[in-house]
Image (spheres, coloured by chain):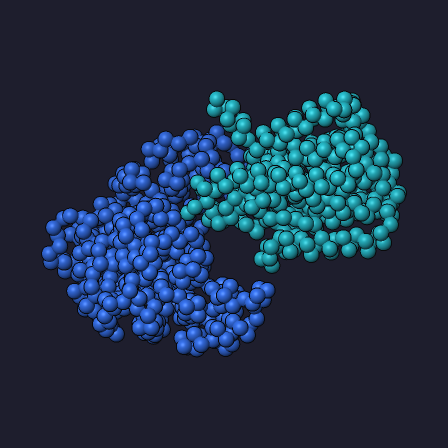
Amino acid sequence: MNGEAIFEARDIVKTFPGVKALGGVGLSLMPGSIHALLGENGAGKSTLIKVVTGVHRPTSGELRLDGRSVDFGNPRDAIAAGIGVVHQERNLIPRFSVAENIHFESFGANRFKPIDYRRLNESAAEWLRMLDLDIDPAMSVTELSTARMQLVEIAKALSQKSRVLLLDEPTASLTSGETDTLFEILRRLRDNGTSLVFVSHKLEEVEALCDRVTVLRDGQNACESQSAEGLTRKDYVRLMIGRAESGSGWRKRDTRAAPQVLGLDDVASGLGHSGVGLSVRAGEIVGLYGLVGAGRTELARVILGQEPVTQGTVRIDGEAVRVADVSEAIHRYRLGYVSEDRKGEGLILQHSVLANAGVPIWRKLAGRFGFLSDATVRAAVLPYLTRLEVKTPSLDQTTANLSGGNQQKISVAKWLAAGVRLLIVDEPTVGIDIKTKAYLHDLLRELADGGTAILLISSDMPEIVALADRIVVMDAFRTKGSIENDGDYTTMSEKIMTRIQDRTPSGTSSGIGETARCA
Amino acid sequence: MPSLTRFVRTDWFGPLLACIVAIAIIQSVSPTFLSLANIQVLLLALAVNALIAFSQMIIIAIGQMNLSVGAIGGLAAIAFAGAMEVWGLPAPLAALFGLIIGLACGALNGLLVRISGMSAFVITLATLSIYKGVNLGITEAQAFYGVPQAVKAFGSAVIAGPVPWLVAPTALVAVWLWFMLRRQPVGRFILAVGGNEHAAELSGVSIARTVVTAHAISGLLAALAGILLVARLGVGQPSIGDDWLILSFAAPVIGGAVLSGGSVSVAATLLGVVIVAIITQALVLFSIDPYLTQVILGGLILAAVSFNRLRESRFIGRFGRA
């Protein structure tokens, strides 16, 4: 079946300093087909897309176009070879007209030749008509809706004679009506022989649209360029999550007698949550599981008072409260949050270890006149840094120079030093090696044993099963009940998947097709 | 109606309205304001100031800033005057010499920004000091007085009525800039790099070449402003350019330029210069302390920036998110 592939990636390895993002991944694209590329965050999807579109050079492996080996030095080479991409972020030039954006590429020929806008508009109108888009080509792209900007980018890619078109989460910001329109257009392109790659976290869309599928997991193919026929949402979930070794280190912990620290009751938020209910007791670890886009990180932001609660009650220590802002959440209610985005939100990378670990308690430690001495901060945070075995040459070391695992320890340590009662930990082990991961797991258990309530957000199912006392399943910004964890991976993953599955009322739950295990 | 809203939403509508209102108010209080003599004074100031503003505007277009605008103008001015006095070069050749110096200084700014990867703020802060130092080293802070009569005559002659010859080069430059930023790929590249550098690069625009081009144009325009000022003053003063910086930002900003790049308007910047000139002139007419001009200029910049921000935030809300 490789004979007729228009584009192939063979055995692609891509390493970044310290990380192997792709470990021998394959992808083969047929003309006139829509190929789904799936995987959880960190699985290697975006790295693969960047290799295919010439942004990254593969460390090893081969790209083949029409059966010939190709080497893209930069994105322009890939475009010239007929590989177009519509990135997740918009790549239009603001305030320029639709037509100018579509044809911007062609300006390079002569830098001083006056632009013939009329001809530009006429030519752009043709591409827009092809996509059934009723847009005035002379209009500024800034005046378009997000959906239409996206379609303009597709028109731009097509005008560059793309035979392979990659769409990275094109529906992330579209309404369902807009999505339907987009799908019609994609199907038409497919029927005209274009080879499309569709990246999405929304599995129903994949089921509705794609005829072939590649799933990545931890930088490997969980499934390569397989026919999508007979595969269901459940199979995709299974392939994406994988069947890793069962939860190691899980032990039964009984916290039923402990008082409730955080309780959410039928909470709705400005971010789109509705009917969210969960409770965390002192010393309890509650896992919040869901696929990417289920609204978990957003829920953390609601709990921390960054986004308003529009309905329902939030209880802290049994008392209904309204957390006004993050500062109040930290200082008054003593809630802590270890961000999923360690580098962007969790740490100030250019600052020292000491400064990072001390931020939340500066206010508490500052003297009467607002003075703050290094010695005071040092005394307050050192026990925690020692306890977490943070490996740093000195406390004055710049945080950016430490490994991911050590950075993560610092982001946990700073909350320990702040004496939080509830710690929300968001994807704590993404991008962290196995040893440190096990260590962080032990650490979270220890914390809980010490009485800290922990809300663990993770897309890593083995991690959730290994750590949590109870698991709350979230899907589409709603909670779908909580499950008592028994530490057995097989039965727990079944139960979790059934909950997520709930949305699609079809009765295909029996006998998960063996077809799913094609890796 | 659509044509009216379109008209209202253009960059130059706000400044034009402000201009008309300001003129109407000042004229009603002081009827001599629109006298021929006064208009000529205004136009003379405009001729030089517009070039200073354009010199900064082209750098704002790529989302950077050029602190060395005044230093380049001053260096070109003394090069022009010095070449005539010391070397006895004819005026056109001396002017060409000054322009080449400006172009080279600007291009050097662009190259340094590109090669070092540092912000234009830092680079041009350094070159500001270098260019000014070279200027003072050459002149030893003494002015060149040997400016030929023909040059002085050009600086004060009128084409017709109150319109001085000095505005002719500025008008040509304005039309050229307008055409370039509207119609020529090279100008569109400059705006594209300022609007979304990443997207521009993916569309095959050479960022390095565009940045250097913009800086070279900036240097050229600053040099032209310096040369015209020598003609107007009749002296090659080393201090030319020392007070250009605030004005160079004020006019484009009043004209609605987005400091992060990608959006500048030649017409609106010109109106920004007019507004500044009118207000300066009005203070003289009302015999208000001239030092107040600085205060008012600062206030104008703040007002214009807040207004632009308001406009921009509406825009970012729809476009800025991924």
Nearer the observer, A20 or A158: A20
Name the residue at 65% across, 26% down.
B21
Percent position (x, y) of residue B236? 83, 44
Q: Specify whether residue A44 is in view.
A: no
Name the residue at 83% across, 45% down.
B237
Percent position (x, y) of residue B170? 71, 34
Percent position (x, y) of residue B217? 65, 44
Q: Where on the picture, by quarter, is residue A146?
A: top left
Name the residue at 66% across, 29% down.
B19
Q: Specify whether residue B84 is in view.
A: yes
Report the chain shown in cyan: B
Give the vertical position of B189 relative to A13 (above or below): above
Percent position (x, y) of residue B14? 59, 31
Q: Where on the picture, by quarter, is residue B240?
A: top right
Nearer the observer, A212 or B258: B258
Which residue occupies the extreme front position in the image? A319
Mark count: 0
Give the vertical position of A113 relative to B106 (above or below): above
Whether residue A334 sits left or right of residue A263 in the image: it is right
Nearer the observer, A65 or B27: B27
Report the chain shown in blue: A
Name the residue at 62% across, 39% down.
B303
Whether residue B82 sits left or right of residue B206 in the image: it is right
